[in-house]
Amino acid sequence: MGIICSIMYLICFITGWDDSVNGNLLKGEKMGYRIVHKKQLNNLVYLMDIEAPRVAKSAKPGQFVIVKIDERGERVPLTIADYDREKGTVSIVFQVVGMSSKKLSTLNEGDSLRDFVGPLGNPSDFIHEDIEKLKNKKFIFIAGGVGAAPVYPQVKWFKEHNLDVDVIIGAKTKDLLIFTEKMEQVAKNVYYATDDGSFGFHGMVTALLEDLVNNQGKAYDEAVVIGPMIMMKFASMTTKKLNIPTIVSLNTIMVDGTGMCGACRVRVGDEVKFACVDGPEFDGHLVNYDEAMRRQTMFKTEEGRKMLKYEEGDTHRPVGCDCEEVDE
């Protein structure tokens, strides 16, 4: 499966085509994908609405797109933050952390992206569940930092199906909280946690979750956690202690989004998985976070990438992937 996905993604980039919901390749606009709206959410985080009708038509919660700014730009995987099928737009949210995201942040409304490929990855499992069964489940979504953006379309899906969910959004300080108004429009309850106590609960999202369950009488059947790796690790430890099954999204460890670079290799229980082709969502109680974070650090250097390839051998990339590694 990995090699098939990788080949399809490469065809998309080489030909300028995008991926449809039926798995067919449809011709994309040669002139690129226009930015119809741009908003700066805080000092380093931006939101953009991209005109991409075919992607918008096919998008589902939990999936991602790959953005390429220009002919020489690198591929940047970004989780879908929202989509409007009528307007034909897809929303992306990104934080400036390197050259590509910095360059992306300089584009304005009316500018176009060279490639906008998607939707990719597996959608959230709950969209396949029976609605009547979901009515008997109580979900809690926990978002850390920029993780509030990919949480939003999932919570919105529940709202569209007349299902109530609770949401926790955490950040270091009040000014770094994003999607607050949008989330309040679709969630039954939204709880905020800031490390410095500048807004909402004073402390981590994990402490807030324990307070809701242990002190406020809340009960949850399933948790969905999206945020930095270290946050997802401790959130999963907390939900395990509270006996709440948990799903995490590992979009944060994806690099090229095709499975060829091996950056998103992660051990889930006894299995080796790749976030971009097998995920990005996995059982949070089975993910080996320490190994994933170690790999993230090593993958930043050429020597580290060589060492990982040597250590992991045939499991460095998806089974059946005989293609050459892509230069970043």
Image (cartoon, rainbow, N blue to C red):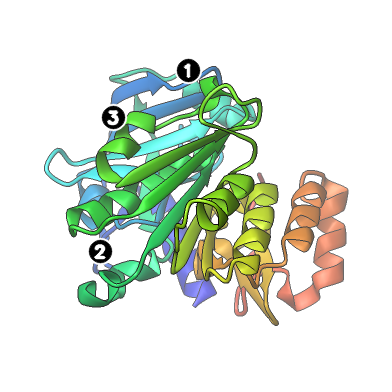
Q: How far across and down, in percent of the image, does residue 288 sit?
A: 72, 67
* 85 and 306: which is toward the camera: 85
SS for dot 3: strand
Across and down, in percent, residue 261 comes to 66, 58
Side of 33 relative to 242 (left or right): left
Q: Which mark is residue 127?
A: none
Kind of residue at badge 2: Val
Residue corresponding to mark 3: 34
Contact? badges 3 and 2 (CB < 8 Å): no
**Which amino acid is tagged 3?**
Arg
**Residue 313 figure quarter:** bottom right
Q: Label 3 vs label 1: CA separation?
A: 14 Å
Determine the image quadrant of residue 126. Answer: bottom left
Left or right side of 7 for 303: right
CB within 8 Å, label 1 to label 2: no
Task: Kindly tell me whether residue 44 is visible in this rendering.
Answer: yes
The residue drawn where x is 57% and y is 71% is 243
Residue at the far bottom: name it: 270
Q: Which residue is drawn at the image coordinates 44% and 35% (left, top)? A: 93
Name the amino acid type tagged 1: Thr
Location of the C terminus by quadrant is top right
Counting from the top left corner in percent of width and height, residue 181 is at 32, 30
Is 159 located above or below residue 76 in the figure? below
Mark 3 and mark 1 lie on one chain; the one further toward the N terminus is: 3
Q: Label 3 neighbourhood size at 10 Å, few (<14), some (14-19), many (20+)?
A: many
Mark 3 / mark 2, whichever is N-terminal: 2
Disc 2 marks which residue? 21
Report the residue at 62% width, 55% height from top: 235
